Image (spheres, coloured by chain):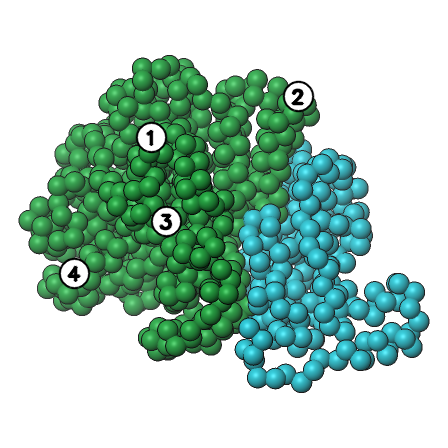
Chain colours: A cyan, B green
Amino acid sequence: MSETVTLTIDGTEITVPAGTTILDAAAQLGIEIPAICYHDSLKANGLCRVCSVDAGWRTNAAACVAECSQGMNVKTQTDEVVRNRRTILEMLSSTVDLSEAPGILALLKESGADPERFAEFKRRESPVYDDNPFYIRDYNQCINCWRCVQVCAEDAQFAFALSFDGRGFETRIGTFMNQGMPDTTCVFCGQCVGVCPTGALKPKRQVLLEQGMNPDDIFRETKRGRKPKREARGGNS
Amino acid sequence: MTDVMNQIDMALLEPIVKRFEGHRRDALLPMLHEAQAIYGWLPQAVQEAISQTLRVPAADVHGVIEFYTMFYNQPTAKKVIRICEGSSCHLAGSAAVIEAVESQLGLENGQTSADGSVTYELVPCLGMCEHGPNALNGTRTAGQLTAARVPEFLDGSYPEPGPKVFGSPRLALGRVGIVDPGSLEDYLAHGGYQGLGKALEMDPTTLIASNKTAEILGRGGAQFPMGVKAEMVRNAPAPASQKHVVVNADESEPGTFKDRTIMEGDPFSLIEAATLIGYIVGAENGWILIRGEYPRSFRRLQAAIAAARSAGYLGRDILGREGFHFDIELRLGAGAYICGEETALFEAVEGKRGFPRIKPPFPTTHGLFGQPTAINNVETLVMALAAFNAGEEAWNQMGTKQSPGTKLFCVSGHVEQPGTYEVPFGLTIRQLLEMAGGVRGGKQLKGCLVGGAAGVFVNPGMIDMPLTYEDARANQVPLGSGAIVVMDESVDVREMMIQLAHFFAHESCGKCFPCQIGTQRQLEILERVAAEGSRGAADLRALQDIGATMTQTSLCGLGQTAASAIMSAVKLWPELVA
C-alpha cells in the first residue's frame, strides 16, 4: 500500500502508511502506549483496552487495532484516558493474581492505580491444573488475554485444544469438557506457555525448581509422566 | 436423576447426523438445538459426534455450548420452566409467581427434578413484558400469571396470551390481531405483497432515494439511517450470491417486545420486508436470527417461510421478476443478549461464541462470512415497507420534519394498559402514558425507564419530552428500542438498579476487560450500598469511574451502555448512593 496518512499524536505530526495502527505510529514517535493483551506476533483483538486513547471519536479508540486516518488528532494522556487506563488496571488487580506479572504491576504503579481499590469484591478463582509433565495451568493468574487460545488455533499451531468456559466475569480458558491436557488435542508445543504474560501457564520444571527440587529429580519426575500413546477417542465418556 | 439421564442412546442422533453431513460450522447452532431436543442436554458423546459431523474442533463446540445459556452440557430435563425476572415482570408482580412455582416444583433456580422430568430457571427477560408476569413452559408462552394459576401453567393448560396492540395510525401493525399469522392467503387478502410487487417494477436506486427521504433510522437502538446503509451494501463490490440481508430479531433489550409483536402477529410482513431490502441492496441470501426465548415467533416464522417458499415468494425469479433470487434461512439463538449486537449476531450465525467484532470494518463491506451485509432490526425493515406502501406524501404528513412517520413503543410496568403502541413521532411521553390509561391504580408516577436496560431513567419533570429523534438526541435518551417501563411512586429504584446491573453482569460476553469486570464490580458496589448503606463520595466516584471507563473504552455497545441507566438514576436521585 503506497498511500500515506498524516496525523497528530500528542501534538506531534507524523506521516505513516495507510493501515498503520495508532499503537505503531505512536511507537515511531517514541510514545509508548501501554497495552497488556497485545503481542507483536499475534492477531490483535483489542481485549484489554488499556491502550485506549482519545482519537476524536465518540468513544476511545483501542490503539492496537485502530488504524490511523488522515487528520486524526490522537491524545494518549488526557485526564479521561489516564482515568480509564487506571480504572481497568485497578479492576484487573481485584480480579486475578498479578504477582507473577511484573509488566502489569509496573503499569499499575506508573498509572497511579490503587491495586486494593476493589479488593473487597469477588476474585475469579480456579483450581490449579497439574495434569501433564510439561506445564501447569493456574488460571487464578489468568487475565483472559486469549494469547494461549490464539497460538493453539489459527495464530500458530492449529491444535484447537483450548476454548472458553462461561462468559462475562466468569469467562475462563477451558478444554473440551474440562479434560486434562493429555486427553485433548494438545500437541505440547509449548507456545501457549511462551506467550502467557502472567504466571498462569508455567513450565512444570520451572515450578519444581522454584519449589526447591533438584534438577535430577525434576528430570525423573517429568519424564515418568510422558503422554501415553493416544487410544481411540471417546472411550472415557 | 443422573443415572436416568446419563443413559444416552446415540442411535437417536443418527438421523440428525445424516441430515447435517456436508454442512459446515454455520450449522452448529441449529444442530445443537436439534440434538438437545432429543436428550434435553448435550452429553459428551453427542458433542463429539457434532464436532466430527461439522468438522468443528471439539473444544470449540464445548466453548459455544458454554457461551449460550440455553445450551446445557450438564444433565437437564427436556422440559424447562422459565420464569421472567425482568424489571417489567417484577413491577407486574412476578415475585408471588416465582414463589408459587418454586414451592410447587420443589426446585430452586437452575435445579432439575429428581425424576429428570423438569428443569426450572429464572431468565433475565423473556420479552413478553406487556404480558407480565410471564413465563415459558417448554416452548409454550404464558402471561398475566398469578400464583393461583400456576398449577394450570405447570400442567400446560394455561392459555397462551394474544396480541396487545394499540395506537394509530397502524402502518406497521395494521394486520396484527386481524390477519391469521399462519395463512399466506390471508396475508395476501389483507394487502400483503402488493408493496413488493410495486417495488420490483422500480429501480433499486430509486427505492434507496425514497427510503432516505423517509428518514428511517435504525429501530434497534443505534439509529443509523437505513437508506445510507442500504446504499453502502448495494455499492459494495460483490455478486448478489455473496451479499446478505440479515434480520436482527434477537430482540433482547429488557422491556422491549415490538419485534416479537410483529413476528408473532404478522410474520409474512417481515418476510416481504426482508425480500424488498434484498432487492434494493442486490443480495440473494437472507437470514433471520430470532432470540432463543421467542419460541412462538420462531414457530410462526418457520411456517411462514415454508409457505412463502412453496408459493414462490421466496426462491428464484420472485414474483416473475427475472433474475431476482432471494431466500431466507432462519436461525434460533440460545440465550445471549449480546447477539443483538450486529457483529456478535454474525458470529452466532457462523456457529461461534457471540463475541462482538472490532469495527471498522463495518458490516456493509465485511459482515456475515466477511461479505457485504445489510443488517437491520425487525421494526426497521417492516417500517421501511410500511413507508413505501404509505407513499412519500402520507408518510411525511405524520410525525415531525426530522422524524416523519410512526414509531413502535413498548409500554409496560405500572401502567393500566401495557402493550405495543404505534403512534406518530412527536407524542410526548406523558401523552403516550395517557393513551395507556395512566399509572396503574391511579398512583403517582415515580419515573420511567426509557430504552431498556441500555437506556435512561426519566423523572416526572421530563415526560413532556416529545418522542422524536431530534428531541431524543438533544436529551440523550435512546429511542430505538421504544421501551418505556413505567414505575409508580412505590418503586424502590435501588432495587431496579441492582436488577439492571445484574442483567449486564449476566450478559457481558467477557471479551473486553472493562465490560467483563466493570459490569461485575458495578453490581457488587450497588449490592453493598443496598445492604450496608453507601460510603458516600467514595462509592459515587467508584461508580462514576467504572461507568465512564466502560462507556468510553468497551469494545461494543453493550459495555458502552452498561452504566447508562444506572448513572442516569444516580443523577436524578442522588440520595440513592449518597
Relative placement, left or right, of B393 versus B417 is left
- Residue kind at label 2, given as amino acid type: Gly
Q: Which residue is mark 4?
A: B307
Identify which residue is drawn at 45% across, 29% down: B456
Q: Quick check: marks 1 and 2 in contact, CB under 8 Å?
A: no
Q: Residue A175, image x and y in percent?
A: 60, 66
How far apart marks 3 and 4 lie (CA) works out to 23 Å
- Residue kind at label 4, given as amino acid type: Ala
Task: Work out whether mark 1 precedes mark 4 in sequence or the reverse, and give the earlier one.
Answer: 4
Task: Work out whether mark 1 precedes mark 2 in sequence or the reverse, and give the earlier one.
Answer: 1
- Residue kind at label 3, given as amino acid type: Glu
Q: How many marks?
A: 4
Q: Label for residue B412?
A: 1
How far apart marks 2 and 4 lie (CA) works out to 61 Å
Q: Label for residue B293?
A: 3
- Number of the front mark, 3 or 2: 3
Identify which residue is drawn at 76% across, 50% down: A98
